[in-house]
Image (tube, grey):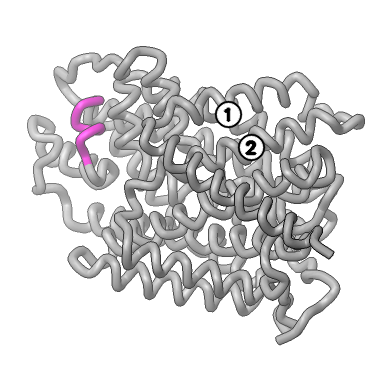
Amino acid sequence: MTDTPGLRRAMGGFDATTVGVGSMIGAGVFVVLAPAAAAAGSWLPLAVVVTGFIAYCNAAATAKLATVYPSSGGTYVYGRRQLGPWAGFLAGWSFVTGKLASCAAMALTFGLYAAPGFETAAAIAAVVALTSVNLLGVTRTALLTRAIVSVVVPVIAFVVVVAFASPASGEPWMPAVNGPVGVLQAAALLFFAFAGYARVATMGEEVRNPRRNIPAAILGALGFTLVLYLLLAVALLSALGPGPLADSPAPLRDVFDAVADPARPSAADGGALPRTAVTVAAALASLGALLALIAGVGRTTLAMAREGDLPQVLSLISLRFGVPWAADLLSAVVVVILLLTTDVLTVVSFSSFGVLLYYAIANAAAFTLPERQWYAPRFLNVLGAGGCLVLAFTLPPVSVLSMLAVLAAGVLWRMVVLRVRRRP
């Protein structure tokens, strides 16, 4: 393995869209709907719509920036080019630290569904296996993600149909915790699920005809996933009610319990086959999200190493497979350490804060572009940046303070590095 001038453009528009859909579906459906319902109550569909609108603002900004700068690194590159090195570094550091936590959360979600009682071992095995897939090249990543999506989406559609066919009886209206703030907090948590469209932009150097394929893939993946999430949120509220949905560790499986015994939505006497199908779909969706997350983190790390914001060794690219092997391997090591030392499910909100800050910078960078497209008017950049910051600071205070401390540590480290470089 050695250095090469650039990565290989091997992905078409359909593969890029599939990567985005696979990234979002795994996180949203099986991780954040229950805690979002706990915050938003019966207003959960409104929280989905709020998240979808802010995500569209971000997607439009990202799509425009990606056509101008079709290289790996996403908003790290966009921020550096349009706003300066410090803005780029803050975006890249927010993305890398937040998404490393997301990788660990997705790996553990897979372990919890696929191997209860041995979830950490299964999670580590998943990280090792999927890192190996990424090291074999991005076309293999896209093919595996396409296969996963082809299984998961039909299962989710089946859950939606069953849920609408078995509405809960007598479930009271449950207002959002803290009123509008609860809806915004739910939207911030749900944003963790919608962030997958950025995975396409971070792999911009590997997409064919990027000026056409990147915007189409980003907007297509977001639109498909938004409709799916909204249908699922309404269906789960209908079948389980807001209270049981908020308390359920696995709401999609509980739908089948509700069909078997509507008086006891959380009973364990649902059909074995549908529950098994949902378990398999959850495991596959988590793997799909983890696969794309590993690829995105590695490519942003590659871009930061190219610019000197991270050690140069992380810019090494495989001559045979055209992937950033050093960055991918380091990402896998960090995720494994997190799995061994941390309860990573508690850091979903940490990841949301980092990603929201990342997109606030993306909107600010897009605002400075002179050329506009129909899908990316300048006022959307203002709404997107403001919306991201508002959502970020509605997250639990402990999560906000923790991520601010991580970001401050990164800024301090870069200041020290710059000072050392200036010395004669």
Q: Quadrant of the C terminus?
A: bottom right
* Span shown in magenta: 242-248
Q: Which residue is mark 2?
A: 359
Q: Quadrant of the N terminus?
A: bottom right
Q: Quadrant of residue 263?
A: top left
Q: Is residue 126 above or below residue 250?
A: below
Q: Nearer the viewer, residue 294 or 415?
A: 415
- Asked whether the beta carbons under mark 2 and mark 1 sit within 8 Å of each other, the answer is yes
Q: Which residue is mark 1?
A: 388
Q: Quadrant of residue 418?
A: bottom right
Q: Quadrant of residue 73?
A: bottom right
- By secondary structure, the bulk of the magenta-drawn segment is best described as helix
The spot of residue 195 in percent (x, y) is 56, 43
In the image, taking residue 312 as reference, residue 148 lies left or right, namely left
The spot of residue 161 in percent (x, y) is 35, 37
Q: Earlier in the sequence, mark 2 or mark 1?
A: 2
Q: Is residue 393 above or below residue 362?
A: above
How many residues crowd mark 1 within 10 Å: few (<14), some (14–19), many (20+)? many
- The circle drawn on residue 197 is none
Q: Nearer the viewer, residue 22 or 364?
A: 364
Q: Secondary structure at mark 1?
A: helix
Question: Residue drawn 59% across and 71% down?
Answer: 328
Q: Is residue 244 magenta?
A: yes
Report the residue that reaches farthest toward the front: 424
How many residues crowd mark 2 within 10 Å: few (<14), some (14–19), many (20+)? many
Q: CA distance from mark 2 to mark 1?
A: 7 Å
